[in-house]
Image (spheres, grey):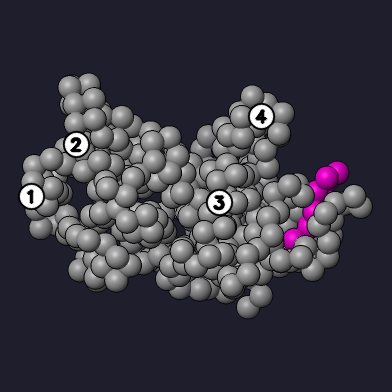
Amino acid sequence: MKAVVLEERGEAGLRVGAFDDPRPRAGEAVMKVKAGAINRIDLYMRDSGKGITHELPMVLGVDGAGEIVEAPKESALKSGDPVILYPMAYCGRCPACIRGDHPNCIRFDICGETRHGTFAEYIAMPEKCYVPMPDGLDWQAAAALPVAYLTAWRMMFGKDPLRPFETVLIMGVGGGVSAACLQMAKMIGATAIVTSSTGEKLKRARQLGADHGINYRDDPVARQVMELTAGRGVDMVIDNVGEASWKESLRSVRAGGRIVTCGATTGGHPSADIQRLFARQIAIYGSTLGSMDEFRQLLDVAARGAIAPVIDQSFAMDDIASGFGRMERSEQRGKLVVDITA
């Protein structure tokens, strides 16, 4: 099969070409991949991969949607079924899985990180990881949902859900997770403030429903937030930027509010400002992906048209390096997808 294979670290180690077809283990099904999507983790795997147990060469790609071509004999899946991939193979037996908290499974396995991924013509994963694709979605929209939109869903509606009467500050609105969070905030009627360094991205965010846009190059974000909220601050901050934005996130959230983070694209070691945390009783939550139940909730909302994935550009496998470069330069305005059939 044709695949995007990481043979060694760095741009030069990424090859598009022939690779062995997947060999499904017991209980696994094979999907013919129609589309995938690029995520920050793909860049991390390309350049570092530190802390993630894996071996090279490895097929990259976490997001994916396609058709079943092979399934176990007793499976409810059948050849030709259109499906979306839940990218985490969870054990189903540990305490977290029994609670339905699959992202905290102690024996998880994630495609594109610890096993071969979706940037290939075929992928094998446990049959329980394939979810029927809702009507009304095309392959590229479907492939954009599992990582960015599921992560956003858990951030917005997980431990301490955003409420319709609240205000959320979304840092760095150009990325896929941030765009998804904006859509979800407006879906429930909350007020959304977004940040970016470019007027173009802020304009796009307003088209998606943002109530206020802040260019963080003009003035400190927290100062502008306090002006917009009459000195109160926001109820929730969504921050996947990290060091560059963390100080402003802490100063923008109200007393008793919460900050939810799922990434640190500018660095993972910001000042904690512990005095502010306890004095203002600020809660900080980490989040990644979502449970299978949350995934089904997200797909139900997408099926009803309440959420429509924002697609920035599509790339063929042969041109995937261009997609990686666009994300690396933070030029995207939504999801970067990969057309596996092109």
Give the residue at mark 3: 297
Q: Position of residue 217 (x, y in %)?
A: 14, 57
Relative image position of residue 79 (x, y in whole percent): 83, 65
Q: CA distance from mark 4 to mark 3?
A: 19 Å
Q: Secondary structure at mark 1?
A: helix
Spatial separation of the CA atoms under disc 3 and disc 2:
29 Å
Q: Nearer the viewer, residue 178 or 280?
A: 280
Q: Amino acid at mark 2?
A: Arg
What's the residue type where badge 4 is placed? Ile
Assess whether mark 1 and mark 2 are in contact (beta carbons under 8 angstroms): no
Residue occupying the point 13% across, 40% down: 232
Q: Residues within 10 Å of mark 3 (few under 14, many from 20)?
A: some
The image shows residue 258, relative to residue 146, as above or below, that is above
Residue 235 visible? The answer is yes
Contact, CB < 8 Å: mark 3 with mark 1?
no
Q: Is 42 one of the magenta-colored residues?
A: no
Q: Nearer the viewer, mark 3 or mark 1?
A: 3
Q: Residue at x 26, y 67 (%)?
A: 206
Tell me the residue that label 1 is attached to. 227
**Mark seen at residue 98:** 4
**Mark nearer the N terminus (4 vs 3):** 4
Q: Nearer the viewer, residue 94 or 62?
A: 94
